[in-house]
Amino acid sequence: SSGINAEYGETEAAQLRRVIADLNTQKEDMVLEAAQTQQRLKHDRETFEEEVRYQKQSLERSAATSTEKKERELADIESRLRERKSTLKSIDRAVKEKEGSLRSLHAEEEQNVRQSEAVKASLEKQLENRNEQISRNEDKLRTLTADITDLTEKRRKAETDLRETLRSVQSNKDFLL
């Protein structure tokens, strides 16, 4: 029985270690993904800023172009700028969601560690209680063994006394006959 319980505790502890390892792997993946997203975001911003600079320079060089054409190009740039800003906001939201998930994973990992420690403490207490019970049972066994030895000696003595009494009675009977 104690072997089964010990095995059950080890299995549960092994499952908890696997869960914690899986959470750590997920956390590393999310951190890497967040870093890659931030890198892409930085690159997109730099590319966009370079494109805006190029477009402004291009507009400045083409001063001979009509005002209407410039206004259309400017409107187009502003439209693309709004689209980029919207994309950047979406990326920022995704990064914040990933950070929230990462915090959640951290909390879950901490909870699993606490649960693991509680299970370990419980198993250690059970083992301590079982060891105390075994010690008490061993003491009882020693006492019973001593009692059995004592009773066996008393029985042998009583049998010897009985044989001697029977011999004496037989002698007296023979003597009286």
Image (cartoon, rainbow, N blue to C red):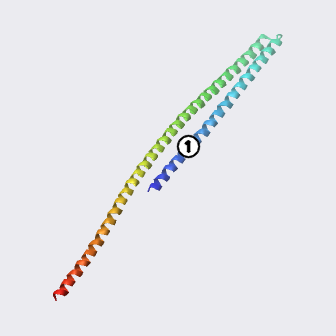
Give the residue drawn at x 66%, y 34%. 32
Q: Is residue 174 above or below residue 162?
A: below
Residue 45 lies in quadrant: top right
Q: Is residue 116 above or below residue 141?
A: above
Query: Along the horizontal axis of the image, is 9 left or right of 74?
Result: left
Helix, strand or loop for disc 1 = helix
Which one is nearer the viewer's eye here, 58 or 26?
A: 26
In the picture of the structure, the residue carrying the numbered disc 1 is: 19
Q: Residue furthest front?
A: 175
Q: Position of residue 44 (x, y in %)?
A: 72, 25
Q: Residue furthest left?
A: 176
Which one is nearer the viewer's eye here, 1 or 55?
A: 1
Which quadrant of the rendered structure holds the C terminus?
A: bottom left
**Residue 65 appears in the picture as rendered:** no
Which one is nearer the viewer's eye here, 62 or 66?
A: 62
Which amino acid is tagged 1?
Val
Give the residue drawn at x 56%, y 31%. 103
Q: Position of residue 69 (x, y in %)?
A: 77, 14
